[in-house]
Image (cartoon, rainbow, N blue to C red):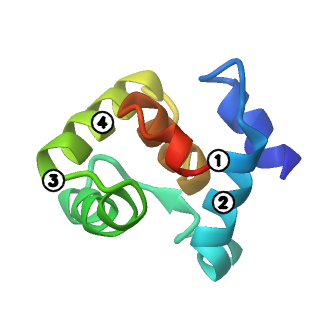
Amino acid sequence: MSDYSADIAKYSPNVNEAAVANIVKYCGIALKNTDSSLVALSDKDEVATVCDGFAAKKLGLDKAAAEAGLKQVGEKMKGNNRKSRVTVYYLLAEATGTLGKLA
């Protein structure tokens, strides 16, 4: 958990460990594979997958709110070419005010 928390801490100073644990549990086996453990925010299919999956099912966001949140996450993580799925999901929840749903 500490590796995920350390990565999140680069972008958000007060990491909610319970939320990180819930995201890791949600992602499950996807985190074992390098390709699926990363998110390409420049790929519209990947963004759609995040919007239709995690954002809608876990955070209860509609597509417009999810896309707006992901845009903020992309700006925050600009320059990082290897965006961790856990970090992206955490920052998305934080940006949309839905972090409490994960804690």
Indicate left or right for 76 with 15 as reference. Answer: left
Q: Earlier in the sequence, mark 3 or mark 1?
A: 3
Q: Which kind of residue does numbered mark 1 sit on?
A: Ala
Give the residue pinned by disc 2: 22
**Disc 3/disc 1 C-alpha distance (Å):** 22 Å
In the rendered view, tell whether residue 59 sits above or below residue 34. above
Tell me which numbered mark, 3 or 4, is placed earlier along the sequence. Answer: 3
**In this view, 85 is above or below 11:** below
**1 vs 2, front mark:** 1
Q: Between label 2 and label 4, give the one nearer the viewer.
A: 2
- Indicate which disc, 1 or 2, sits on the residue closer to the N terminus: 2
Identify the mark nearer the N-term, 3 or 2. Answer: 2
Q: What element carries label 3?
A: helix
Which residue in the structure is indicated by mark 4? 69
**Residue 33 in view, yes or no:** no
Res 49 label: none
User: Label 3 belongs to which residue?
Assistant: 63
Circle 1/circle 4 CB separation < 8 Å: no
Q: Where is residue 45 in the image (x, y as percent from the top left)?
A: 21, 66
Mark 2 or mark 4: which comes first in sequence? 2
Q: Position of residue 8 (x, y in %)?
A: 66, 34
Whole-number angstrom distance, CA of label 3 to CA of label 2: 22 Å
Spatial separation of the CA atoms under disc 1 and disc 2: 7 Å
Instruction: Between residue 99 and residue 50, name the one nearer to us.
Output: 99
Q: Which amino acid does label 3 sit on?
A: Lys
Q: What residue type is labelled 2?
A: Asn
Q: Is residue 93 above or below residue 50?
A: above
Query: Which residue in the structure is indicated by mark 1?
Result: 103
